[in-house]
Amino acid sequence: MKIGILTSGGDCPGLNAVIRGAVIKGDQIYGVKFAGILDGYRGLAEGDMIPLPRKRVRGLSFVGGTILGTSRSNPYERGGLENIKEQLHDNEVDAIIAIGGEGTLSAAKRMADDGIHVVGVPKTIDNDVAATDYTFGFDTAVAIATESIDRLRTTAESHHRCMVVEVMGRHVGWIALNAGIAGGAHASLLPEFPVSIDQICIWVNKAHNRGRAPVIVVAEGFAPLGQEGETTSRGMGNDGRLRLGGIGEQLAPIIESKTGIETRAVQLGHLQRGGVPTARDRVLATRYGTAAIDAVMEEKWGHMVALHGEEITTVDLHDATTELKSVPRDLWDEAGILFG
Ligand code: F6P
């Protein structure tokens, strides 16, 4: 038996640990062979695959990025189902482990519905895949964002400034919420809960009046109340005009002019996705990898490995892809007690 592994969508710390876990267990326990499918669904559509022997995955658990490369491709837009079947047949691949976020897993579900032998592994720093408690990469991203807030706070305090820290999260604010709590921010702004500019300025002024340097964490997908849908993480308005920077850079001058407090913005961007995974992410990713190979051997096509509590289990890809996992209101309210 030969199993193809692919990593697709935005990269994420821990991808290599999944690959390592799957290959070591597959080799040692089941005696199966592996093919590395390069650049996600691009490599699947083009039959671009390499042998993935056990020696190739040695020492990989702490290495960031993905040794297989990744892309944001959809196999149905690159040759369709017949091509996928042909490439798998030509490369003698019997089943696929698809590691990715919501887009990748939706394509995996469609392939499973079309009879392809595929098992999913949830990945994203955003932690927005449903039907699992956590995705690997999230813990690392929160750790990086928290350390950045710690560092930005000292320079903000020296200059008596307000600091707006933009973190990733196009659709959900898990990173902003957690880094905001861990870093002791004076507000965390999430896409799920729009608040007005005036409310943000109240929080900034309250912190400033207590002698603190206000720190505002904002998820890239946040839009102020009344302006939802007008800004995007790409800094492009719906009117098609280029706006410099992301939401953080858009908010900073407004906060400064309304409060009179000098304000700077920092966009953490891809720093949150690069580099070594935390120990927690390495463990979760490795467990996902070993569970994925079990799922393949049990022929759980159309399923995804998932974390429920401390237990790794499998769920139907349908449950993981019908909607994104957003931050519940009560968690945001709980954090809100600390604002201002
Ligand atoms: O992986 C999800 C994500 O990290 C989002 O939070 C962010 O908007 C996006 O990726 C950035 O993607 P890219 O690397 O393609 O610019």
Image (tube, rainbow, N blue to C red):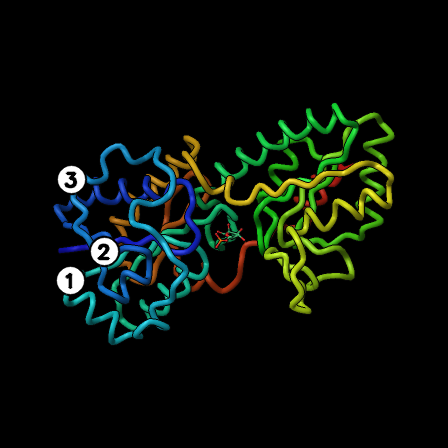
Query: Residue 129's x, y, as percent?
Result: 48, 54
Disc 3: which residue: 28
Q: Which element carries disc 1, helix, strand or loop?
A: loop
Q: Does label 2 or label 1 sit earlier along the sequence?
A: 2
Q: Tell me the tag on residue 181.
A: none
Query: Residue 340's x, y, as percent?
Result: 80, 36
Residue at the image point whose x is 41% and y is 48% from the top: 11
Residue at the image point whose x is 28% and y is 55% from the top: 38
Query: Residue 249's x, y, as percent?
Result: 69, 47
Disc 2: which residue: 4
Residue at the image point whose x is 28% and y is 67% from the top: 45
Residue 151 vertical placement versus 248 (above, below): above
Q: Amino acid at mark 1?
A: Asn
Residue at the image point whose x is 57% and y is 36% from the top: 145
Label 2 environment density (alpha carbons within 10 Å; few <14, some 14–19, many ≥20): many
Q: Tell me the tag on residue 91.
A: 1
Q: Amino acid at mark 3?
A: Gln
The reply to whether the residue tagged 3 has its Cβ within 8 angstroms of ligand 1 is: no
